[in-house]
Image (spheres, helix red, strand yellow):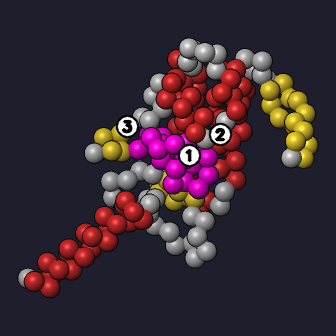
Amino acid sequence: MGDRFIWVGQHPGVDFCNTEPVLDGAPVDLVATGDALLAWAAAAGLPAAAMAPPGRSLTSATVAWCHDLRDLLRAALDPTVADRAALGSLDDLLRSVPCSLSLAVGDGCRVAPRSDDWECQLRLELATATLPALALDPARVRRCAGPACVLLFHDTSRSGRRRWCDMAGCGNRAKVAAHQARARAAAG
């Protein structure tokens, strides 16, 4: 799913929260522009990302709306914040997108929000893909134990003891640091 984005969350909503990681000690917004947001949406498999008219990017209003969605979703999911009041603000944000409901037939039959405007459709698809993260078991949505890491993940492990966003990155750094500390203690 794309190599310029971080896909460790085990859920699109958690992965969307992770589009603002801390890299080299500073926060970096991986979806700061309309083009970057479209690239993330395409990598996440949102159909509206492919509906963008040629040569056109998202407006600053849509980018701001998507950032608000990410910030409110993170406020509701991040166990270090756990701001359940963000749910009311999320509801207000969703009401700002004009849409209608239509029947989606394919793998079963369901009702889906639709808009004739491709930017509104992208907003709807982003909300539909990410907001179900709010139904995840809050005890299984965690922030990485890496001291400098702000990434969230949904712990889908059988034991429920996952501590790191990624064992190859943060987990490995923690293990190396612990090994070096033990070696220093044994030598000194």
The residues colored magenta run 1-21
Q: Position of residue 66 (x, y in %)?
A: 57, 30
Q: Which residue corresponds to mark 2?
A: 45
Write down the quadrant of residue 38 in the picture.
top right
Q: Going by the image, does 159 lie left or right of 116?
A: left
Question: Is there a contact, CB below 8 Å, between mark 2 and mark 1?
Answer: yes
Circle 1: residue type: Met
**Disc assigned to residue 127:** none
Write down the quadrant of residue 158 in the picture.
bottom right
Q: Position of residue 109 (x, y in %)?
A: 91, 43
Q: CA–CA distance between discs 2 and 1?
A: 8 Å
The earlier-in-sequence mark between 2 and 3 is 3
Question: Is there a contact, CB below 8 Å, between mark 1 and mark 3?
Answer: no
Q: Which residue corresponds to mark 1?
A: 1
Q: CA–CA distance between discs 2 and 3?
A: 23 Å
Please rate how many residues cluster around mark 2, counting C-alpha atoms within 10 Å: few if below 14, some from 14 to 19, many from 20.
some
Q: Going by the image, does 45 lie left or right of 32?
A: right
Please name the residue shown 84% across and 24% down the image.
Answer: 100
The earlier-in-sequence mark between 2 and 1 is 1
Please name the residue shown 65% across and 39% down the image.
Answer: 45
Q: Position of residue 43 (x, y in %)?
A: 58, 39
Circle 3: residue type: Val
Q: CA–CA distance between discs 1 and 3?
A: 20 Å
Tell me if I can see residue 85 in this picture: no
Question: The residue tagged with tag 1: helix, strand or loop?
Answer: loop
